[in-house]
Structure formats: C-alpha cells, structure tokens
Image (cartoon, rainbow, N blue to C red):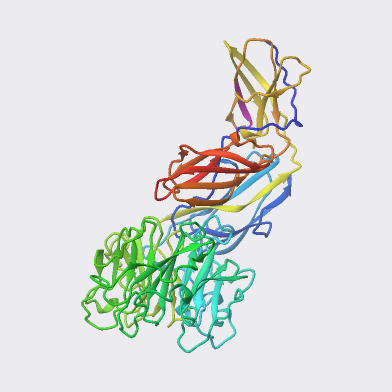
Amino acid sequence: MKFQKTPVSSLFLGLVLALYVLSFSTVTRANVYATNIKLNGALNSVTNAAGSSLTISYILNEPATLGTTVNVLSGSNIVRSISFSSGAVGTLKGTNIVLWDGKDGTGNAVGGGSYNISITAAASGFTNWTQTSTDTNAGYYVYSPEGGVAVNTNPNSKYYGRVFIGNSATGTNSAPGGVDGILKVNADGSLADEGQSTGGYEWQNDSFNDSPQHVRYGQDDRIYALDFFDLSTIIAFDMAMTTNQVVLSDANYSTTPGYNGEGWITFDVTDAGKTNGRLWLGDDDFSFNGGIGVWTWHMTNGVADTNDTSGTQVLALGGALTDDCMGGFMMDGGSNIFVSQQIRADSDVDPRAMVFTNWDGVHTLTNGAAWSVGASDDTFEDINDTAVDKRLHPTYVACALYGTSGGIRVLYASNGVVVTNATGTQTLNNLDGPNAYYGVAWDAVGNLYGASTTLHNWRVFSPPGTNQATTLAVETVQITGASTTPPAITGINVTGTTVTIDFTATASDSPSSFALASASTLSGPFTAVSSAVISQLSPGHFQAVVTTGGLDEFYMVVRSSSPVTAPDFTSIAVKGTAVTLNFTGSTSDAPSAFTLLGSGVVGGSYSNASGATISQVSPGHFQATVTNSASMQFYRLKR
C-alpha cells in the first residue's frame, strides 16, 4: 500500500462539518448582558484581510464586575479568547470598544473563513432588587410614559436589547423624550444610533395622554403600539421605526358582540410573523357599562384577518374578573392569560391580579382562574399594565401601579405570591412606590423595566444574585487571503482494512477544514473519500480514518479553497402539522449535506427530526419539510 502526502489547496470538496448552525442564540438569564454588538462599527457582517485587526464594540447595561470574555469562534470551536478584568475597558457600563488582532490563541493568523463573536459578561450582582438606570441621563427622560415600555428580547435580532417607551403627550422641552410618539433607547440608556423617528405615523397630542397607549415587542422583530385615540388601532413598526403598518383597526371589531364603543384599552401580540400569530385585545370599561373581557384575532401576512369583524372571545367577565382588563394582560406560550383589573374603589373585595390557564382556542374562559390575588388590598389598586418575565414558563409577573401606593408589584407566576429577595428581607409589594407607574416590561435576561409618570422617566431594576450572560453576535467576520499551514501527514497506520492517517495544520483549523482524497495511481486523478472520518487530537493535530479495499491506494489530505457557506434559515411556514423551512447554503451543496434537528426547548437536547425531508429549490437554496404535532418546537440545521 502506497501513500502520497502532497498537499493540495486548489481542490474544493464537499466537507462533512462537525458543527451545528443555530437558528437562534442561547442566552443565560442574568441581569448584566451585552447588546448592540458591532464589528468595525457596523451592525452588518464584515470582511477582513488575514492578520488585520477587528474592532468589536458592544453595550453593557451595567458594569461587568466579575469581568468580560470575548470569544472568537470558528463553528463551535473557540479560536481566540480575550478576557477583561473588572474596571477595565470591556467591562464598563455603556459602550466598550475592544480589538481582536486576527490571531488565534497561539499567536498565528487565523485561516480564511467565517468567524463568529460571542461576549460573556458576569457580575457579582446585588443583595436586593436594585435600580441600575440613571435618571439624569437624557435617554431615560420621557415626559408622559403612559404609553408603556417594551424591550427587544430576540437574541437573533441585531437590535437585541433595544428599549421602546411610549410618550403620550408633547413635553415642555425639545428632548427626544418630550416628543409625542415612541422613544428608541439602548440598554444603557443611550439614544438609538440612527436617531429618533415616527415611522411615518401621526400620533395625536390630545389632553387624555392616550396616543400611544401601550407598546409590545413582537416575535417578527417589530414594535407594536396601540393608538387609543383612533378607536384602538394597532400599528407595527420595524426596529428602526422607518415605516409603519396598520395591523388592526375598528373594521376588525365593528360587529364584536357587546362592544360598548369605549375602545380596547390594552393588547398583546404572540407568534407575530408566523402562520399562527395572534393579536389580543382587552376592553375599556371606564364608564362601568359592563366589560367584555379579552378577544383575539388571527394574523395573516403581518395583519389581522380583514375578513374577521368580530374576533373570538377568549376571556369573559365572571368569577375572578369582574370589572375590566384595564390593568393589562399578557399571554405566555402555554395559552395562559395573566390579567389584572384596575379596581379603583377602596376595600373592594374583588381580586386585582389573576391567571386563566390553558385556553383551548375555542371556548370562552370565565370563572376558572388558577389563582387570583389582591382582594381588599388597597395598596394593590390602580394597575395599568401587566407583564410576564418570559413567554415560555414564566417565573414572575409584574404589575405597574399608578395610584396612591404606586410602584411595581412583582408576583410569582405559579401562585401569585409576592416575590421576596433571596434572604426574604425585601418584599416586592410596591417596588419604587409611591412613584406612579403606567408601564412595565422585562428584558431577555431578567431585568425589570418600568415607565413612571411622576418621575417623567423609565427605570430599570436588576434582580439580586451573582449572574452571567452570553450574547452571540448576529454579524460574522469573513477572513480572506489567509496564509495557512499546509496539511502535512506525520504518521500512517494500517490495521486490516482500516487506515489511520495523522497530520498537522494550523492551530486554528478545525476538522471541517480538511477532507481526505484518494487515487489508484500516483498521478491521480484524486477524488474525495466521503466515508473518511477526520477528528482533532489537539490544536493543529488531526487524524483521518478510512476503510480501504486492500488494493494499492494513494492518499492526500486536502484543504478547501472556498469557504463553505453555513446554512441559514430564511423563512418558516406552518400549515396544520406541516412545517416548511427554507434555508440557504453553498451553491455546490447537495440536500444530503444537511440534517434537520429538533427540540421542544430552545436550549434543550437536539436530535434528528423524524420524517424530515430536504430538497433543493435552486443552487444554494433548499427546503426542509417535517410534520410537527408538538405545541412548541425549535429547529437547527447540521451540516
């Protein structure tokens, strides 16, 4: 048996990549985290020459008192890890700018290809729930924040962590927070880089502070707002608020039974952008004419179904809910409705907050509250907004209070009991009372946001405890023109029909950088051995294993001259139990190069999606189809 170790760098082969390409990022829940990540000052992917430095900037919402680590990743492999100690640049609240010199951990320039950036921030935290925002910063000022507050919680969005506050009246100064409309702010309180805008929608500066009335973040990466002045119209804006779209108007509820014409005072949006998306509206019964609870409309192509003029009643008055939904409500991923009623009368025996569970999509819920709290509690009056900390299996419910007691009350989602800190010494009956709060929201890592009219500010409160969070940048850096070490065979072992070939290359290389090629003669031609398995022994040291048929065979280890395009989801459609996912890859890829994986939990264990089929739509464009009978499923692609 004969072997040839001549390196070939011009042969492009389809490689089997031992890495997962995620359709989302995984974030550990914590109160310090990185957002607004930019590469070379841009929110888009960039290209760098080999050996040149990359500028990485990001915003920390508070200091990383236990340090920050910036990792450069090639697939799932950490190529370079750069750490910053507490107090140094890289760990400060606000914008941090750091450099990567384009080298791996051994000091060598990395090879050509696509690299990801992740940022892990850690903090010792606080003993109690603690305000981390600074009232004197211009970005925290909002003249009349009765429009509420919402936060981008999608780590796949380049605007992850952006905060939106509804200002419902024109202020007395020209500050951005004094303009009637929606304020765009970064997680540290700095104003959005691109400036403020209306998205082309004209808000009404009337005397009732009701335009906008509420804001919510949608999973389609849009901000939704309710205009109570215009018969409760729902409008959606892109994250930079360059355009707007009316997604629901009075035409959708003109025949809603019992609608008293006073308007829908609160709303929610779930699964926006998907075929099962819904808008949910809660009634305004300010004149005590008898409320009609919560109703829902299906969304199609980003708007409520225009043929549906009555909607579907989800929750009716009766039992725990006796007055209206003016205290706000929010849905979780299990069709549970966390709802509050304002209760403006002292010593009222009706509960203030409650949860109705497992709506079946058809029948109206009435008196089946799983828990209800606050009856006869005058310190829990005048709720104006309600929010859960996460859509899937929420831990906390927060209620914004604007009455005499004011503040924000935090409850456990499981039973409605008031939350205390770890030592039990601080009870969140009325956090930051007696300041009047009209809006409340949570970010993706557990911070609590409130919009206060008495302060003319929005504030942020971090939960107690040591914490850590990792954010994966949406952008990538493409390294070109890299000088790499050619693969060199260092050892060969033949046992029966099994051939084991050891070889070396650049320390930053991964097994996916190489393939094994063979020929029956020294002069070739050489073709890829698809059955060969290549593994990494240590940085720069690799091993290829292949089965031979026993005849003379010549082998070479080859490096791909063209970067393999990572598969990237472009759209998803759900019809009944049929799920269709479109994605892109390299133009030279075949459908067999990919495997669809599924999990019922975003951070769970992924396995092959049973029954999935993958086909090619056109060169570089593919489609995966699978049947899903589960209520919730997350997908990844493996090359």
**Residue 59, quarter of the rendered image:** bottom right
Identify which residue, 61 or 272, lies in the foreground: 272
The secondary structure that most of the magenta stretch takes on is strand
**Can see residue 187?**
no
Q: Is residue 472 above or below residue 542?
A: below
Relative to residue 104, is residue 239 depicted above or below? below
Asked if residue 522 lies left or right of residue 635, the reply is: right
- The image shows residue 543 at horizontal and vertical percentages of 60, 24
Name the residue furthest right.
523
The front one of 472 and 166 is 166
Q: Quadrant of the N terminus?
A: top right
Quarter where residue 394 is shown: bottom left
Image quarter of the C terminus: top right
Q: Which residues are magenta?
A: 539-545
* Residue 460: image location, x then y, percent: 45, 69
8 lies left or right of 33: right
How far from the left and from the top, in percent, is residue 208?
A: 45, 87
With respect to residue 121, does 597 lie above or below?
Answer: above
